[in-house]
Image (cartoon, grey):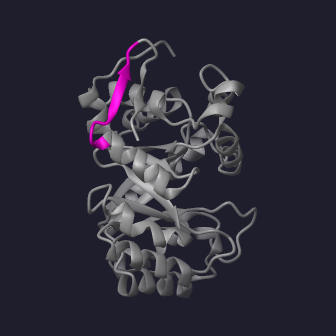
Amino acid sequence: MSVINATAEQIRALLKNASIEMTCKDTGDLAEAATLVPKGTDIFIALFPNQTWDDLTVAAKAVGEAGFNAVPHVPARRIKDRAEVAEIARKLTQVAGAKKMLLIAGDMPSPEGAFDSTIGVLETGEFAKAGIKTFYMAGHPEGHAHMTADQQRQFEARKVALSKEQGFELKFTTQVCFESEPIIAWEKTMRANGIQNTIRPGLGGPASIKTLLRYAKICGAGASIRALTSGKASLIASLLKDSGPEEVVTQLAAATGSGSNFESVHLFAFGGFLKTTKWVSAVQNGRFTLNPKDGDFTVQL
């Protein structure tokens, strides 16, 4: 993409309500995070295969007690049956106090229980009944490994329909992307199909190129992964410093407006929760310098 210049105000506006991802083991960093980003920030909590629903509940409660909005990840393919949906919903709402969640299919090759996708879990209505007011659902700007484009459009439309039937707010958060073009194109496709729900592009937080490449493959990043091994993300640069999402943020900030449904961005904390939180804080507080020739900015940590 040619150089796109966004103003500092546009960049800060896009990052004003950025969400950040942590793991169940990052609760010890929440006190410091609370001094960096605003209370009420959405903090997503990843659930690893070796962790339990109780681990997720404990972490979500800690996030809420730190003054943030807990957004626990719930992989549908890990859930045994409707009864377990109800039990997970009870723990997350009554014990942890969560009102938001990210419902994803999950990366396991086959379901561990009754649900092959998020649709079946949503159709039980148990999470909405328990008090979950906002659902984040995954968006796939670079396509889905196990779905055609038409199937993706059908799933997106069904999720919107269920949100209206059950009365919850539906937001889309994309899988991690390292270029802005697929995100911008997908957002336009969503609007063209009559879907006006807000969208958070998923971006990789500051980390080494080696780390970003490793997690990008785990997360199923699409063709945009090439951005990590070309241009400014060269081998030499990767040995000298972390790479962050500055260029993509600049391009998305310039594209925001004109009817787009981007509400902010979501940061995958591949380099660590606290490191990503410090990066977000710096941008939110204007501690960055624009690089007009490069179409990005330099963050002052």
Q: Residue at the spot x=71%, y=46% of the render?
A: 214
Q: Look at the picture and state if 7 lies above or below 186.
A: above
Q: Position of residue 120 (x, y in %)?
A: 55, 69
Q: Residue furthest right?
A: 109
**Count of labels shown?**
0
Q: Residue at the spot x=39%, y=53% of the render?
A: 19
Residue 140 vs residue 2, the one in the foreground: 2
Q: Is residue 125 visible?
A: no
Q: Look at the picture and state if 162 lies above or below 187.
A: below
Q: Quadrant of residue 169?
A: bottom left
On whether residue 111 falls in the magenta region, the answer is no
Left or right position of 172 against 10: right
Where, quadrant-wise, is the C terminus in this rendering?
A: top left
Q: Residue at the spot x=35%, y=32% of the render?
A: 288
Residue 179 vs residue 236, the one in the foreground: 236
Q: Position of residue 53 (x, y in %)?
A: 56, 81
Q: Residue at the spot x=44%, y=85% of the render?
A: 91
Q: Look at the picture and state if 230 lies above or below 112.
A: above
Q: Position of residue 81 (x, y in %)?
A: 60, 82
Residue 256 vs residue 33, the one in the foreground: 33
Q: Position of residue 283 (x, y in %)?
A: 34, 39
Left or right position of 78 against 4: right
Q: Is residue 47 visible?
A: yes
Residue 18 vs residue 109, the one in the foreground: 18
What range is drawn magenta here?
A: 284-292
Q: Quadrant of residue 196?
A: top left
